[in-house]
Image: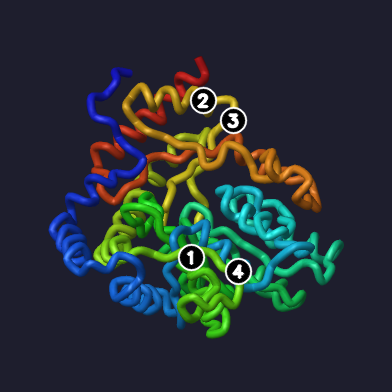
Amino acid sequence: MNKMKQQIAMVDLAGEYREIKDEIDEAVHRVLESGHFIVGEEVDAFEHEIASYLGVRHSIGVASGSDALLLALMALDIGPGDKVITTPFSFFATASAAVRLGATPVFCDIDPRTFDLDPGSVRRYLEASYTPAVKAIIPVHLYGQCCDMDPLLELARKYSLKVVEDCAQSFGSTYKGHQSGGIGDIGCFSFFPTKNLGAYGDGGMVTTNDDELAEHVRMLRVHGARHKYHHEELGINSRLDAMQAAILRVKLKHVDEWTERKRALAAAYNKELSAIDWLQAPYVMPECRHTYHQYTIKVPPEWRAVIQETLAQAGIQTQVYYPEPLHRQPCFVGKQELPEELLNADAVVRSVLSLPMSPGLNDSDRRTVVLAVEESGNEAVR
């Protein structure tokens, strides 16, 4: 296959900017002319707009998605000796937030269809090993699809656990009509540039319907101070800046349209890739709105490197999210609990592959991707 002159990127951020350039430029100039760059009116307005969009009482802007997770656990008083149940198949920040506070991540297995935390694995752990040290569950809404939350919420009620939603990849995703970030006790969003709603730098958000939790997070994000120079707790410096808030306010107006474009792209991918019997297209749970932060297929593990190389030769970017599960990361050795063998997580990391998924991906480029995937199978069996 001849190498293409133009690369098909995973996400076309430059194209997205060109689509809304005038609105973005006006927002940036507005902030520059105001002279106010940290929190302030832009952040206040964005927090209210996000709360309205998600249907929650409180949205608190912070510096990153990683900080959102850390602040959420701090606000819940998670610390040394505590245990937090979560998934081994996620970005590093999910578990690192617990370890940074001295808590132990308990890695339960994942559902092999959705790749999200398996409620059955969580139930087995709690039934066999629950102690009062277990304080919270962190489900990750991976790739833009919500976890199966009802059984997790039921377990949380039964064992008096807090539920912290990792919504870094699921802005706009819904579970049985409920927006991610408003289902558990507290939600944590990332506005990293490639996310469904992405800034032009780092940014994050904590969401909750609990007034006390919201107030606690607000204090913790400014060094534990409600009033300047009076520090009640050891907080951190994690404030969303006005420039990113202004940019995100513009993009929030377009996010639903962009999401529907991605959902249409995913439907077309599904239809065309269904003829390829050696791959598995994304599974979508009933009554869920999948926002396709990533379009991730499963391929034969022994073929994946060849498939990636064939697509790369065609000018098509691919990514593996994630090549190594968290329970096998060196930094967590001796700091984690593994209640059972994580067979699904260990298998999935060898077979997942994400294809280009961007609102601006046109039909021609999509067809090029599909044809290259077909050809990669032929290359793999040679």
Residue at 40% across, 53% down: 192
Q: Amino acid at mark 4?
A: Leu
- Nearer to us in this view, 311 or 228: 228
Where disc 4 sits, the SS reads loop
Question: What whole-number distance in Å separates the C-alpha atoms at marks 2 and 3?
Answer: 8 Å
Query: In front: mark 2 or mark 1?
Result: 2
Report the side of 129 relative to 74 (left or right).
right
Report the side of 175 relative to 268 (left or right).
right
- The disc, 2 or 1, on the residue closer to the chain's N-terminal end is 1
**For mark 2, what is the residue?**
305
**For mark 1, what is the residue?**
288
Task: Check the picture and name the quadrant holding the N terminus.
Answer: top left
Question: What whole-number distance in Å separates the C-alpha atoms at marks 1 and 3?
Answer: 28 Å
Query: In front: mark 4 or mark 1?
Result: 4
- The disc, 4 or 3, on the residue closer to the chain's N-terminal end is 4
Q: Could you tell me residue 238's position as x and y percent?
A: 47, 63
